[in-house]
Each structure stands twice: as structure tokens, then as C-alpha cells.
Amino acid sequence: MAVNEMGLSTLGITFGYAVGSSKPSSFTQLDRISSIGEFSVTNETIDVSCLEDLTSKFVRGRGTINDSIPIVVNWTDETEAEWEAVLTAYNGRSSGQTMWWEVIIPGMTKAAFFKAQPPTALPIPSMEQNGAFTNTMNLVAEDLVGWDTKVNFLEPTLSALSLGSAILTPTFDDDVFEYTCNITDASTTVSVTATNTGDTVEIFLNGTSKGSGTSSLSKSCTWTASTDTVEVKVKHIQSTLTYKITVTHNA
């Protein structure tokens, strides 16, 4: 295996959360994190020296974790909504579940995991002139899980996209965002399904919303020109992706 002799930087580090009784299979990314505090374990030392020892001898004792982990966030309407979602997820957890946190470092195979409680309410930060507007979330540390196989953060994608029986070109793939198709009917039902349950989906025809829904949506679109544009926006927390279909209408 090649060794990065120069080491790694903090560029591109991402941070997110999930709720579970064991390591969750999916995490939600939090945006605009400017710093993540240290999570460490400090062990007490136990003196096991005896009369015949000329120097003191110690063994490792109980470990103590730091009581809080400060997470500094660039504070905007979007990040405020993200952290409100964190509190909602934590308060809605089932018995035996706790909140997990993941730090993904580009260039590392494993990610860092720990368990911690979010604040009970979003704080109002101190403010100084001519500075970045940030807010500090002090997480109450519970357990240092350590380094383990990374779990990629959830992205707002579609698992299904169709326009009636029309054939999309290219064939639908959640990582492909632009399509074309030919249609002869005067109107067609556009149907979409989000990959992540609970994500918001919205269908647009030529820039005008036809409606929105949660997880899945079907809307009839009446073609008004020889070429129309259908856009589907799927939103996960504050992240949005857009799928575009150029529809050629052949009457």
C-alpha cells in the first residue's frame, strides 16, 4: 500500500450524525462545520508499588473522557435548520438508542466515530465586530467508539424517475442528472421516488412547480410546446439535487 509521506490535511473533512442502538448504516451530513473539538480518554494511574521497589510502579486505571466536544458551525438559516433536525432526531429516538457522530477525513480508509448528546436547545452565540458569525454546539460526550469503517453520508437522490411509458435517454441512474425523451401524448404522468425515506421531492414544468411531496410523488404534466423541460428537485435536510428532463413533444 502506498504511504502518504507528506501526511494529510483537514481540507474536505465532513461531519454528520445518526441515531441508533448500534453503529447506524447511514449518517446525515452537517454543513459548514468550521472546527471539531477533541474527544480523548485520559486514564488514571494506580500505584502498585511495593516495599521492595526502588522506583514507583503504576498500572493504567479508570479512563475519563472529556465532558464536552465543541462543534463550531458557520451560522446561517440553513445550518440552524440542520441543527434543529439534530435535536428533533435525538428527542425522537427510541429506547436504547443514542446519537452517533462520524468524522470522515479524505485520504483515510476509516472514519472516526463517537457517541454524544446534542445540546437541549440551540444556543445564541457571542458576537464580535468584523468576524465570522459562528455558533458552538457543545456535545455531551458519552463514548469514544474510535476508528472504524466509514459510512458515506446520505445524499438527496432519486431511486426511480419515469414519464409514463416514455423511454429516458440515457437509462435512469441515480447519479445521472440530465435526460431526454420523446413523447406523443398531450399529457404524461411524471412519477418520482426519493432514495431516502422522508426526503422532499418537487416536480417543475418549465420552471413552474406542479407540486411537492414526501418520499414519492406523481403529477400529470400537459405539454405546452414542442420542447418542454421537466425538473425534479429532491431535498435531504438542507442539501438539494436537481434532475432535468428535456421533453420533445411529437403530436
Image (cartoon, rainbow, N blue to C red):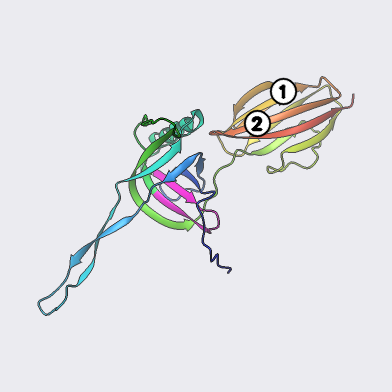
The answer to which image quadrant residue 204 occupies is top right
Quadrant holding the N terminus: bottom right
Residue at horizontal 28 percent and vertical 57 percent from the top: 42
Q: 139 or 3, which is in the foreground?
A: 3
The residue pinned by badge 2 equals 233
The amino acid on which the numbered mark 2 sits, given as a three-letter code, is: Lys
Callouts 2 and 1 close, C-beta under 8 Å: no
The Cα atoms of the two marked residues, 2 and 1, are separated by 11 Å
Instruction: Indicate the position of residue 178 as horizontal and vertical percent values.
Output: 75, 37
Instruction: Indicate the position of residue 160 as horizontal and vertical percent values.
Output: 68, 38
Q: Secondary structure at mark 2?
A: strand
Q: Is residue 12 left or right of residue 65?
A: right
Residue at horizontal 79 percent and vertical 31 percent from the top: 246
Residue at horizontal 46 percent and vertical 30 percent from the top: 80
Which residue ends up furthest to the front in the rendered image? 130
Q: Which residues are magenta?
A: 98-114
Which residue ends up furthest to the right in the rendered image? 251
Q: Is residue 211 left or right of residue 184?
A: left
Instruction: Indicate the position of residue 153 as horizontal and vertical percent values.
Output: 54, 45
The residue pinned by badge 1 equals 207
